């Protein structure tokens, strides 16, 4: 479990942890329970509309390994997740079972023109009208081409540019021009406490390489998220050094 602390630039913190096989139905469904996440921050009530944004994402690196990433305004206490969601062995080693890092020093080092590998799990949607005369409805993009276009349409305002492939490696007839892969499309369907009906959403993960065009705008994305469904594990972009 990895957590990143954001202060000043929100003073953010980041956390990660690894889950064993068959741990917890909430993770196998692709989303740790939002309530459990909120309980990690004692001063932040789940119902507080003005509460600072907490972003999170689960990465599956192998069938027996799930990493939970959290970016939050304050350092969380994830003891309950370690106990309930499957990391007791990590806690038994004498460590809390997760790692926390100050995020602000990293955010302050983002410079215009630098390049980074990135990962983003998002809920790419658009508004469409299913019948004439009916109001538009939020609808998921379902093809990799449209899902990629969703990301590219937001890159300028988000402070980055997804890098293009060298011309000899582009397959323009298939829309394969950028250094990014759209993968792991998932359809989530679950109930929400106190709300009738079901919540349904489609998520995809983007792995690629970007160049920073506006450091301040990118910092806002890294601490506030990109797109919809942030409460359900979408919107958290992470960066890693190239090479």
Image (spheres, rainbow, N blue to C red):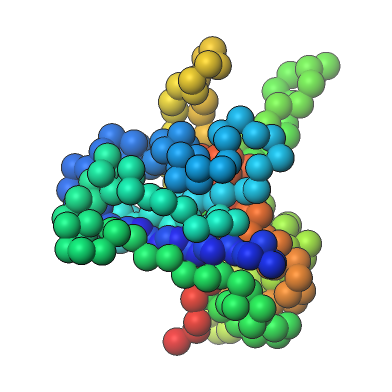
Tell me the quadrant of the picture where the C terminus can be found: bottom left
Percent position of residue 10, x then y: 67, 62
8 over 17 or under it: above or below: below
Kindly indicate the quadrant of the structure image that contains residue 124: top right
Q: How many marks?
A: 0
169 over 102 or under it: above or below: below
Q: Residue at x 52, y 34 (%)?
A: 201
Q: Residue at x 45, y 61 (%)?
A: 3
Percent position of residue 7, x then y: 63, 65
Percent position of residue 205, x then y: 48, 55
Q: Is residue 134 left or right of residue 110?
A: right
Kindly indicate the quadrant of the structure image that contains residue 43: top right
Q: Residue at x 78, y 62 (%)?
A: 157
Q: Nearer the viewer, residue 201 or 58?
A: 58
Tell me the quadrant of the picture where the N terminus can be found: bottom left
Q: In this orientation, does residue 143 appear?
A: no
Q: Residue at x 69, y 67 (%)?
A: 8
Q: Nearer the viewer, residue 223 or 96?
A: 96
């Amino acid at each position: 479990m990895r957590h990143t602390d954001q202060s000043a630039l929100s003073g953010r913190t980041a956390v990660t942890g690894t889950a064993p096989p068959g741990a917890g139905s909430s993770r196998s469904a692709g989303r740790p329970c939002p309530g459990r996440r909120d309980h990690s921050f004692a001063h932040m009530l789940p119902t507080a509309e003005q509460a600072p944004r907490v972003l999170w994402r689960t990465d599956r690196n192998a069938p027996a390994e799930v990493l939970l990433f959290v970016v939050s305004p304050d350092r969380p206490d994830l003891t309950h997740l370690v106990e309930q969601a499957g990391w007791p062995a990590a806690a038994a080693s004498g460590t809390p079972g997760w790692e926390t890092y100050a995020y602000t020093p990293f955010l302050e080092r983002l410079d215009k023109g630098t390049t980074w590998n990135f990962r983003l799990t998002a809920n790419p949607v658009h508004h469409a009208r299913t019948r004439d005369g009916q109001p538009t409805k939020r609808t998921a993009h379902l093809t990799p081409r449209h899902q990629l276009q969703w990301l590219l349409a937001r890159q300028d305002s988000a402070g980055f540019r997804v890098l293009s492939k060298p011309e000899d490696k582009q397959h323009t007839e298939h829309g394969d021009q950028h250094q990014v892969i759209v993968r792991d499309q998932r359809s989530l369907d679950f109930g929400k406490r106190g709300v009738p009906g079901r919540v349904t959403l489609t998520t995809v993960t983007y792995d690629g390489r970007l160049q920073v065009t506006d450091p301040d705008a990118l910092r806002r994305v890294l601490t506030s998220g990109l797109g919809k469904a942030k409460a359900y594990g979408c919107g958290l972009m992470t960066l890693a050094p190239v090479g």
